[in-house]
Amino acid sequence: MYTEKVMDHFTNPRNVGEIPDADGVGEVGNPACGDIMKIYIKVKDNIIEDIKFKTFGCGAAIATSSMVTEMAKGKSLEEALELSNKQVAEALDGLPPVKMHCSNLAADALHAAINDYRKKQSGN
Amino acid sequence: MRSVYFDHSGTTPVHPEVAEEIYRYLTKDNFGNPSSIHHYGRQIKVKVAEAREKVARALGADPGEIVFTSGGTESDNMAIHGAAITNKNRGNHIITSAVEHHAVLNTVKALGKEGFDITILPVDQYGMVSVEDVAAAITDRTILITIMHANNEVGTVMPVAEIGKLAQERGIIFHVDAVQSFGKIPVNVDGLGVSLLSVSGHKIYGPKGIGALYIRKGTRWRQTLFHGGSQERLRRAGTENIPGIMGLAKAVELAMKNMDAESSRLRDLRDKIIRELTAIDGVRLTGHPVLRLPNHASFIFKHIEGESLLLSLDMKGIAASTGSACTSGSLEPSHVLLAMGIPPEEAYGSLRITLGKDNTREDVDYFLEVIKPIVERLRNMSALQEEVV
């Protein structure tokens, strides 16, 4: 049901964990829906220097979280905001149709982290 | 890598003796249609009668009360729809429970849309229906009560004998889905006081696509779904599935022979699993601790999503299941766990281990060894993890 890439990211997820002094944190999903993704970013000179995730969810939720961190790392904030859930799914060679909506929220979590970072910046 | 099958409530491997029996009735001169007059048909008709006798004996029924069907879902549909339509001039009220299999629940709900009044009884924290609730729900218009014998997701064994007594006193038709219990614990149609009872072949090492419906003599029931020939004494049209029927009868024979010894063997393995898993932080048993199927252990793992757990176990060669949605293709958490009052975020973290004839103590030890690091890994990854006490 899952592609090899999904299983690879599920088995060996990249960038799992938290960044205690993160510049931005984004969270999407809801435990009542069975998926929560939390993304932490460290930003330097407008570049995502470090990124980590924590996810409660099914195989697709974990794999998309892992993939989005890999795709976003080293990118500018503008480039990272361009990343879409669809691109993340494509990078994993696709997801089962039933997972496209519920568990494919990793790019949203990334965008939320970037927005959180920008809000904090403008607040300073 | 070790390969361990722990999903016997989902389906079971066909027993080699059953497979032989099926093969026999797919080959040589054993292809006849039992409705035919010639000797090909006649010799099969005798065999079908013997098979019916075996299934009837296992249930404490008369052979004439057994109808072969395509499986549990058909038996449930046929029983419930037939009873409702046949008795609609006497009343229109049907009672069931919130934790029934969808073959029952969705059939009852469909009748609800056709104008029948339906009562879906709640269950307690163990998934148990209360006899008092059934008694309180009965009205003068009640024509059918349908309650499962044992729950497929949490293994709880329902007080069906007491409900049966109640139904008999009130002259109400009582249907029991015994798909999960038959072959594992005693199922006697008189002891349970049932009018209709569904069983399935593939849960007891028989083939898929075959089941049976017990219909007590004198029950106001007729076939309302299948129209066609006069097979099964007008109760189920369509040429009989001979290899399936013969395979089912063989499976039933073996299940009856092995039930006592196998139940106690599996109960020991099950209890070891329950003991060791519930010792892990944030893991608890679902379903009744005592009144449950001997081969059935089901759990909630806090802060872990069931599908992740299943995939991780599968990578270690262990095939288990979950009441969680993701595996079943629907995204809703299990209706059974929700009915038991388990919040949705916890219901997603369910795991069901159902043991069977080829499972050994070594399988159980292997499972208990590999699951602990999996739980730790998934919890460390979980966005809910910081809430773990």
Image: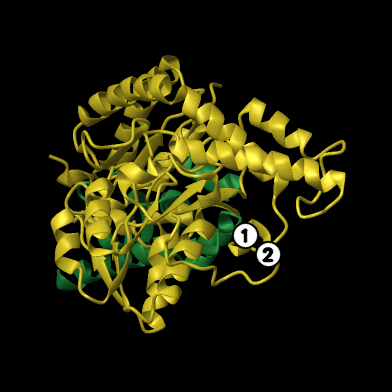
Chain colours: A green, B yellow
**Labelled pair 2, 1 in contact (Cβ < 8 Å):** yes
Total labels: the figure holds 2
Vertical placement of residue B182 versus B84, above or below: above
Residue under label 1: B233
Q: Circle 2 sits on which residue?
A: B230
* Position in image of residue A7 (x %, y %): 53, 43
* Front-most of residues A78 and B147: B147
- The reply, left or right, for residue B22 in relation to residue A11 is right
C-alpha span from label 2 to label 1:
6 Å
Which amino acid type is marked by label 1?
Arg
Labels 2 and 1 in the same subunit: yes
Element assignment for label 2: loop
Q: Amino acid at mark 2?
A: Ser
Q: Secondary structure at mark 1?
A: helix
- Image: A26 above or below B40: below
Residue at 44% in and 57% down: A72
Q: Quadrant of the C terminus of chain B?
A: top left
Q: Quadrant of the N terminus of chain B?
A: top right
Depth check: give the residue in front, B273 or B376: B273
Badge 1, how many Cα within 10 Å: few under 14, some, many 20+?
A: few
Picture coordinates of residue B264, whole percent (x, y): 35, 21
Q: Residue furthest top?
A: B362
Q: Residue at x 38, y 46 (%)?
A: B152
